[in-house]
Amino acid sequence: IEISGSFVDGTGENIMIRHFFKSFSTYPAGVKAKAMIKKSRESVARLVGGEADDIIFTSGGTEANNMVFHTAVEHFWRNWEAAQETHRHLNENRVFPHIVTSNVEHDSVKLAAEYLQENRKADVTFISVSQETAHVEVQDIIAAVRPNTCLISIMLANNETGVIMPIQEICSRVKAMNKKREKLRILLHTDAAQALGKIPVNARELGVDFLTIVGHKFYGPRIGALYVNGPNTRTPLYPMLFGGGQEQTFRPGTENTAMIAGLGKAAELVTNNLLDYEAHMQKTRLYLEERLKAVFKDKIHFNSHYPGSDILPNTCNVSILGPGLQGWRVLSNCTRLLASVGAACHSDSGDKPSDILLSCGIPVAVAANAVRLSLGRGTTKADVDAVVEDLKETVQLLC
Ligand SMILES: Cc1ncc(COP(=O)(O)O)c(C=O)c1O
């Protein structure tokens, strides 16, 4: 049996994948599938600066993020007894694993953390991002660390504002703390879903133990992977599901060969062309911002701009100020522009202003009008002109 899937490879051509055979079968097609998976693993590893064995393919970013939280809790309980000798003062009350994360994470982190907290499986500290910079401040993360902290999970770049977080600095501060916490070290995780394919990402340089990879964010198919710095050697990893023994036994089921092949190809394209992609997106976004300012003048507010903060090259979160110009109204009246008011995965949250923007200090009336414009590898200046014209006509209609 043969099946094929297709996705856009960023050059506008469709790549057809025909890899349906099981990689552990010994017939020639099975051997070929195995080789394909190996090649893809190497390509994905190269994308994030790791080794092939550091890559665990998953169904997507949500699974990768949940695996990290699950692992951190398990890591705590397996090491807590030994660590107690060092932290005797914690013996008095029941101690839970403690996790530090931010208040602007994707739901796949936020809801996993809330679940653990609500079900008394972990204590979680949600660090608020600064309302000046829209990123977490390193000192706030460090100040939140407790003797029972087992995980710090902060995204690399926010999916609504594009603001980049100080992960490298957090990791180097926490690594210094970990030198005194041999028995229960703090694991470091970043969800790099939004950053990959837009800026250079190197897990080793960042200093993380775990890094989440999402294929569809960089023109790949809808699967993902988790980078683990030496699974079960340097970094603990525990499976959530059992049966099948794939991915070094960390995952069940039969490998999704076609999607894995696609993820590898998408990773390869990013590794080879990132500088061009990045420069193109940056140039086109700056042009978009210029055009928006020229047309809407002081009625435009950029929800991605914070003094001193770096943002992804492709993200332009913007509000056109004025009554009746809520993001959802503007977008539903545009004839050409296709965008969402916030994270695409929250597109059913309707007319509510985004919690992420409110957390970044954007006033309610401004956040209510937000639209998130994302530029791609193929977005041209002519596309930008068409979108700005579309917005102009829509605003005239609604005002
Ligand atoms: C920052 C971030 N993390 C995780 C995810 C979840 O990834 P997936 O849809 O592959 O589960 C997304 C959304 O796609 C995201 O934007």
Image (tube, rainbow, N blue to C red):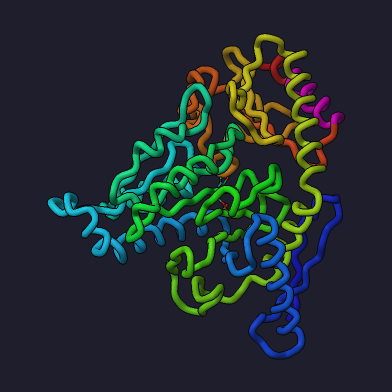
Camera sees residue 329? no
In the foreground, 163 or 385? 163
What residue do we see at 71% from left, 10% from top? 297
Q: Residue furthest left?
A: 92
Q: Position of residue 259 (x, y in %)?
A: 68, 65
Seen at 44% across and 75% down, the residue is 242
Picture quadrant of residue 311: top right
Outermost residue, top direction?
A: 298
Can residue 122 be seen by looking at this rendering? yes
What residue is drawn where x is 67% and y is 29%?
316
- Is the magenta region chiefly helix, strand or loop? helix
Front-most of residues 24 and 140: 140
Segment tinted magenta in the rendering: 381-392
Q: Against 168, is 9 above or below?
A: below
Q: Quadrant of the C terminus?
A: top right
Q: Considering only vertical position in the picture, is 163 above or below 105?
A: above
Where does residue 25 sit, x and y in percent of width and height? 66, 87
Q: Is residue 202 left or right of residue 241?
A: right
